C-alpha cells in the first residue's frame, strides 16, 4: 500500500507524539508516588518561590517560638526560618543560669533582637547574664524609669557593649527579623508611671500566623493601644496572656481584638499572686481557647511554617469548674495530668 504525502505527514506526527508520550511516561516522571514528606516539601518550595517577595510570607521553613518555663516570670525566644533570633525578656535572676543553659543547648550565640518589655525583675532579672554571654545586635526597652540595682546593672552592661544598638520600644516601631518574619510594636503608646503598662507589646507575623506578645501590659495600656491602632492590627493566632494571666490584663475588648486561637500563660507553680486568675481562665473557657501554661507544662515550643501551627505539649480549654480550685501537674513526658496529691506522683 502506498501512502499519500498527507498520510505520511500524519503518521509522522503520530509517531512523534507517541515517542513524546513514552518519554514522558517512563523517563521523566518518577515510577512511584513521593512519600508525604516529599509532597509537603514540594508544596513548601512552591510557596517559597511564589511568595518570597512579600514581607512576612511563609517560606516552607519553620519559625520556632520557645516559651521558656522560668517560674513566675517571662522569657520567650523566636528563631526564624533563616536563623535570626529574638529574645523577649529573660526571666528573673533565680533562673538566669537555667536560661543560659537552654539558649546554649539551642546553639544560640547571637541574639539579633533583645527586648526588655519593662524593668520589673521577673522580666529583666536574668538579662545581664544574657548580655554578657551572647552577641546582642539590637536592644529594645521602653521609656520607663526604674532604680532597682538589677535594672541599673543591666543598663550598665548594655552601655559597656558599644556594638549593641539601643532603641526605644513604643507603638509604631516596626522591624524585620530576617527575611520572612515581621514585627510591629503596638505599645506602649505613651509614657506611664505604672511599669506594667509601660510594657513593650509586639506582634510577630510569619505568613498567616501571628503572635501577640504583651509583657505585663494591663487594661489601661490595652485600652490606649486599642484607641491608637486599627482593630485589624491586633488579630493574632497566639496570645501570650498579659501579666502572667492576671485579671488586671487581657480584658474582654483586648481579647475581642486579638481573637486568639491559642493562649499561653507564663507563670510559676503555686505562685504567690494566684496567677493565672480565675477570671482570666473563665474568659478563655468561654471563648473555648486551648491554653498552654508553663506552670503545668514546663517549656512550651510552638512551631509554624507560616500556615500550620503545632505545639510540643497538649494544651486544654480551661475547665473553670474543676481546674481553678485544684492545681494539676503534668508528668515529664507531658502526657498525663495528676492532681497535686495524686499517689502516682509520690
Ligand atoms: Zn511580670
Ligand atoms: Zn511587671
Image: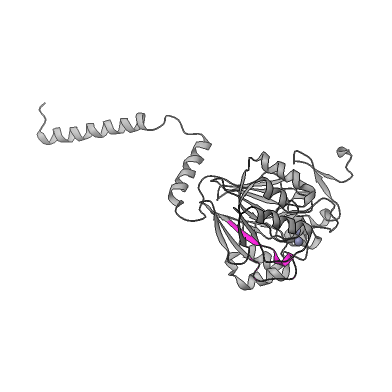
> From the viewer's perspective, is residue 28 above or below residue 218?
above
* Residue 189 inside the magenta-drawn segment: yes
Q: Position of residue 344 (x, y in %)?
A: 86, 38
Q: Residue at x 74, y 66 (%)?
A: 195
Task: Say which of 307 and 242 sits in front.
Answer: 242
Percent from the top left, x then y, of residue 277? 80, 60
Q: Which residues are magenta?
A: 187-204
In this figure, what is the number of numbered marks? 0
In the orientation shown, which residue stands out farthest toward the top? 1
Which percent across, then down, holds residue 199? 69, 63
Residue at the image point whose x is 67% and y is 66% from the top: 143
Quadrant observed for ligand 1 in the rendered image: bottom right
**Farthest-out residue, bottom:** 227
Query: Quadrant where the C terminus lies?
Result: top right
Q: Does residue 67 show up?
A: no
Coloring basis for residues: one colour
Q: Do we see residue 92 in this rendering?
A: yes
Location of residue 214 with respect to 313 vertically, above or below: below
Q: Is residue 107 magenta?
A: no
As rendered, which of 214 and 292 lies closer to the eye?
214
130 left or right of 110? right
Compared across the picture, whether 103 is left or right of 46 comes to right
Going 17% across and 36% down the picture, which residue do you hit?
Answer: 10
Q: Is residue 166 left or right of residue 11?
A: right
Q: Quadrant of residue 115?
A: bottom right
Among the 4 quarters of the image, the one containing residue 273: bottom right
Where is residue 215? Give x, y as percent: 70, 60
Residue at x 81% of width, y 45% of height: 329
Q: Classify the position of the N terminus by image quarter.
A: top left
Amino acid at each position: 500500500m502506498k501512502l499519500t504525502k498527507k498520510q505520511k505527514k500524519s503518521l509522522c506526527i503520530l509517531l512523534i507524539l507517541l515517542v513524546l508520550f513514552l518519554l514522558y511516561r517512563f523517563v521523566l516522571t518518577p515510577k512511584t508516588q513521593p512519600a508525604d514528606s516529599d509532597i509537603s516539601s514540594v508544596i513548601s518550595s512552591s510557596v517559597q518561590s511564589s511568595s518570597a517577595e512579600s514581607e512576612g510570607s511563609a517560606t516552607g521553613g519553620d519559625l520556632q517560638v520557645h516559651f521558656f518555663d522560668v517560674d513566675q516570670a517571662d522569657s520567650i525566644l523566636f528563631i526564624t526560618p533563616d536563623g535570626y533570633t529574638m529574645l523577649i525578656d529573660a526571666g528573673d535572676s533565680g533562673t538566669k543560669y537555667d536560661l543560659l543553659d537552654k539558649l546554649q543547648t539551642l546553639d544560640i550565640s547571637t541574639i539579633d533582637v533583645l527586648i526588655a518589655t519593662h524593668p520589673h525583675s521577673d522580666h529583666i532579672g536574668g538579662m545581664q547574664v544574657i548580655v554578657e554571654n551572647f552577641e546582642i545586635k539590637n536592644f529594645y526597652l521602653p521609656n520607663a524609669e526604674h532604680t532597682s540595682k538589677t535594672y541599673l546593672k543591666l543598663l550598665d552592661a548594655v552601655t559597656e557593649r558599644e556594638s549593641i544598638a539601643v532603641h526605644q520600644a513604643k507603638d509604631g516601631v516596626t522591624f524585620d527579623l530576617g527575611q520572612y518574619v515581621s514585627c510591629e510594636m503596638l505599645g506602649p503608646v505613651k509614657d506611664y508611671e505604672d511599669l506594667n503598662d509601660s510594657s513593650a507589646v509586639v506582634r510577630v507575623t510569619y505568613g498567616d500566623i501571628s503572635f501577640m506578645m504583651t509583657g505585663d501590659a494591663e487594661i489601661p495600656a490595652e485600652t490606649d493601644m486599642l484607641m491608637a491602632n486599627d482593630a485589624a492590627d491586633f488579630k493574632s493566632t497566639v496570645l501570650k496572656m498579659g501579666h502572667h494571666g492576671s485579671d488586671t490584663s487581657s480584658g474582654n475588648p483586648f481579647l475581642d481584638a486579638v481573637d486568639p486561637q491559642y493562649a499561653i500563660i507564663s507563670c510559676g507553680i503555686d505562685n504567690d499572686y494566684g496567677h493565672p486568675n480565675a477570671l482570666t481562665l473563665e474568659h478563655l473557657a468561654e471563648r473555648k481557647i486551648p491554653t498552654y501554661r508553663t506552670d503545668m507544662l514546663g517549656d512550651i515550643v510552638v512551631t509554624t511554617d507560616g500556615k500550620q501551627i503545632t505545639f510540643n505539649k497538649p494544651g486544654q480549654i480551661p475547665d473553670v469548674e474543676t481546674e481553678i480550685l485544684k492545681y494539676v501537674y503534668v508528668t515529664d513526658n507531658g502526657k498525663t495530668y495528676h492532681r497535686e496529691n495524686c499517689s502516682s506522683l509520690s
